[in-house]
Amino acid sequence: MRHRKKHQNHKNRPEKRKHRSRGGKAFFKNPKRILTGRVQKKPQGFAFIIPSDPKHKDAFVSRFEARLLMDGDQVEYKTHRDGKGWAAEIINILERAQKEVLGVFKKSGDHCYVETSSGDLFVVAGDSKNIAPHQWVLAKITAYPTARGAAVVCVSEVLGRELSPKMDNKIAIAKYAIPEHFSSKALQDAEQAISWGQEELKNSSPQRKDLRHLPFVTVDGEDAKDFDDAILVTKNNHGHFVLNVAIADVSFFVRPKTDLDFSAFERSTSVYLPGTCIPMLPEILSNDLCSLRPQTDKLTLNAEIHYNSKGNVIETHFYEGMIRTARRITYNQLHAFFEKDPNQREEFKSIFEPLNHALELFELLTSNRKDRGVLDFDLPETQMELDENAIPRTVFRRPRYESHRLIEEFMIAANSEVAKALRLGKASALYRVHETPDWEKVDELNALIRRLGFAQYLKEITPLAFAKVLSETLGKKGSRTLHQAILRTQKQAKYEPSPKGHFGLALMDYTHFTSPIRRYPDLIVHRGLKEFILKQHTSDKFTEGVDFVKLGQKTSERERRAMEAERFVTRRKQCWFMKTKIGETFKGIISGLIERGLFIEIPEFSLEGFLPVDALNGYYEFDEDRMCFRKRPGHLTLSVGDPMEIQLTSVEVEEGQITFSLADKK
């Protein structure tokens, strides 16, 4: 039975077009054209290409063709049908992802080589007599694989026979080729920026507003070091609000086409790994000069947004500012203040009024947010505390308070207003684009909704329709699995020079403006805002010679690289944590099912493992249509959302595998 009528929302469906040759014959298949994508290498030797354009499917690469590829490489390729899927024919390797590899050192006769976990083999050059076989090593690549010869490496560091938890970050940096060190010229540029900042603070330019008398505050996590943003909310007698979002004026310090600018672009984002941060900018800038530390004069770029009593924008102004934040507030402190904790209210009595106004405005914006149909995913974010051996003392779900949502909503407001101004000004910049999901994926999602037993279906592709399903299923059995599936249905957000709107936030105008210390696209937006909106035309225009399409592609790729590295290390830490608990029993919830077994989440630790179907007591059949396992003979079923007591049987850190069995019932 179909879940929507054929006549419904035909306007939302993409038009099917026939490609015609010059002879006039119609073909239903798209003609072959060259695509670009990223290589995902598998230990078995084959690979998949993850396309740059999410409209295309992943494509399989045979072992023979994959022998010349490395994990993360950017390639050009063509595709053709191969059974039910797509196969790739590699045309060209655009960019090698890795400069250093992690692998096991091995010997075969007089030959030495390094084998990586993705199945790549590298011939070792140089003196390796003192390296014992079967040790983990880091090795620098001196020659990449070609049709004529294997890749060559030189061992740079011997890590030992076993990888310890302290090496997790180093492994990720090598695996994902994350730049860790700044060049001497980039550091010199950073030092030069100090004198620029000191001069501007003493003798500021005429257009920079002095706002140091105003009680701006920063709101961040307990362990934050770089403070990008500060806020101030005021209210007049007519019930109108003014939200002033002050963002670190990073573009003043990081000038276009300098070595410092190139280093920032090469990284494109700060990378946050458990216990450390690999910053996009040198620490003298990220943690000091640009960071809006309390009671310190700082340069800012401000978005001043005026709202009426209903929370609708009346007007917006942008300008360069100079502020001196009154307080540094943590999310926990602001949460306690909103909960009317007497001690916290006493501590914040000097800024009581602006914080109260901030809460009032937030409530108005939250109401508008619901009316738009913003997609709110209540999915856990893992947090951990590490001991001296870099093993988590505990792993838990990071709390999310109204204080988090308030700052998020204010940043979204600033981002949206900046994007609108850039669009109307036809400025060169990067927009944060989140496109509408495809009907094909929505059909698959509706099928899952039916299998999970929910009554809600998506009959149209709008933010409001998705938001309704999310809110109406929240807290129900199987909702966690459904919400994750809805998230997977969404397209990957990316950076592009054309404003196309943000589906998930239900906004026509959106960009990233609020985090230039840790995101390069934000820095580009600051430059665009200054040059075109603030009319600062300098002799060295940042747009000259810049391909904004490629700039968006590169920054999007590096954002994904950072996210993958963060997930990789988080999973290793989860494995190290659970490795100390083998044999223990836990209360879990079935979070997913496949024919081979069940995925089990332990809510207490906000992590997931796998229970093979063979570990169940008795014989079970997998019913894919109803998303459950059925015991035969009998009527017992196991489905998503069911509680289950489990026992931890094994942990494989290198594979990221946590395996459970049923707990013994005594």
Image (cartoon, helix red, strand yellow):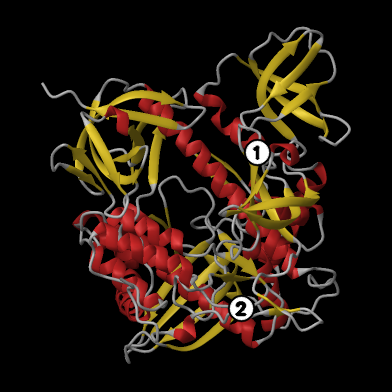
- Please state if 342 lies on the left or on the right of 225 as rendered: left
* Quadrant in the picture for the C terminus: top left
Which three-letter amino acid code belongs to the residue tagged 1?
Phe
Q: Is residue 499 above or below residue 172?
A: below
- Residue 247: percent from the left, percent from the top? 56, 66
| The residue positioned farthest toward the left in the image shown | 666
Snapshot quadrant of residue 557: bottom right
**Residue depicted at x 15% and y 41%:** 636
| The residue positioned farthest toward the right in the image shown | 148
Mark 2 lies on a secondary structure that is loop
**Residue depicted at x 30% and y 41%:** 601
Q: Is residue 213 something one can see in this rendering?
A: no
Which three-letter amino acid code belongs to the residue tagged 2?
Pro
| Disc 1 to disc 2, C-alpha distance | 38 Å
Tell me which label, 1 or 2, sits earlier in the chain.
Answer: 1
> How many other residues sit within 10 Å of disc 2, few (<14), some (14-19) or many (≥20)?
many
- Residue 61: percent from the left, percent from the top? 68, 45
In the rendering, which numbered label is found on residue 499?
A: 2
**Residue depicted at x 72% and y 40%:** 66
Q: Is residue 49 something one can see in this rendering?
A: yes
> How many other residues sit within 10 Å of disc 1, few (<14), some (14-19) or many (≥20)?
some
Query: Which residue has dot 1 on it?
Result: 46
In the rendering, which numbered label is found on residue 275?
A: none
- Residue 282: percent from the left, percent from the top? 67, 47
**Residue depicted at x 70% and y 71%:** 527
Q: Is residue 497 above or below residue 156?
A: below
